[in-house]
Amino acid sequence: MNENELTTEVASLAETVMALRVTDATSYKAASDVLLQAKDMQKRIVAYFKPLKESAFAAHKAVTAKEGSELAKIAPVEAHLKKQIGDYAAEQERLRKIEQARLDAIRAYDGECALFRHLEKCHDYTSRENGMYRRGHPILVLPCAGLRSTVVRWRLRRGPESRPGTDLCL
């Protein structure tokens, strides 16, 4: 049996079924016989396409296996490239953070210089090697110790006669 014969038989059976009306015992018997023919036709259709499906499935399995072996060859290449790209991106981010910290430190230094210029100009402070002293007063500007910042912090500290709590961190 070929596909054209199968198509012709299915079309003929469909015409017979559409013209059939079950109204009495004779038509009931005829409808039962046509139903048996339809079941037999289903079996023949399944039997006809079974070897085609099996060969298609075997071809699919073979193609899938070949595809998998080729993909397995490219996987290390992909992993290597992803690692290289990730390492480059991480290095660029590290350099960006270093540059950002450098710029932040420059801005902080500029701010501190502005503070010192303000203290010198408006409050009669003078710069010395380890800080700033107010002329004629025991007030000293020193770096704050123990701060976890890359920005230099300064502390105004009054002399030995200062009261507790009078230190000011800027």
Image (cartoon, rainbow, N blue to C red):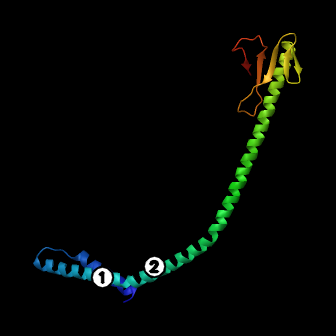
Front in this rendered view, residue 50 or 99: 99
Q: Is there any visible trace of residue 163 in the rendered image?
A: yes
Position above or below: 13 against 159: below
Instruction: Give the CA distance from mark 2 to mark 1.
Output: 20 Å
Of the residues shown, which amino acid type is indicated by label 2?
Phe
* Amino acid under disc 1: Lys
Identity of the residue furthest to the bottom in this view: 1
Seen at 74% across and 49% down, the residue is 92
| 135 left or right, relative to 21 | right
Residue 145's disc number: none
Mark number, residue 43: 1
Q: Residue at x 81, y 33 (%)?
A: 106
Residue designated by label 2:
57
Residue 101 place in picture, x, y as percent: 76, 38
- Give the class, few, some or many, for how many residues have Cα within 10 Å of label 2's Cα (few <14, many ≥20): few
Please state the horizontal and vertical placement of residue 2, each as a whole percent of the image.
Answer: 39, 88
Asked if residue 18 lies left or right of residue 3, the reply is left
Identify which residue, 109 or 63, lies in the foreground.
109
Left or right of 27, for residue 5: right
Looking at marks 2 and 1 on the same chain, the residue that comes earlier in the sequence is marked by 1
- In front here: 148 or 84? 148
Res 145 quadrant in image: top right
**SS for callout 1:** helix
Between tags 2 and 1, which lies in front? 2
Looking at the image, the residue that sits furthest to the left is: 25
Task: Work out which quarter of the rendered image holds the N terminus and state it.
Answer: bottom left
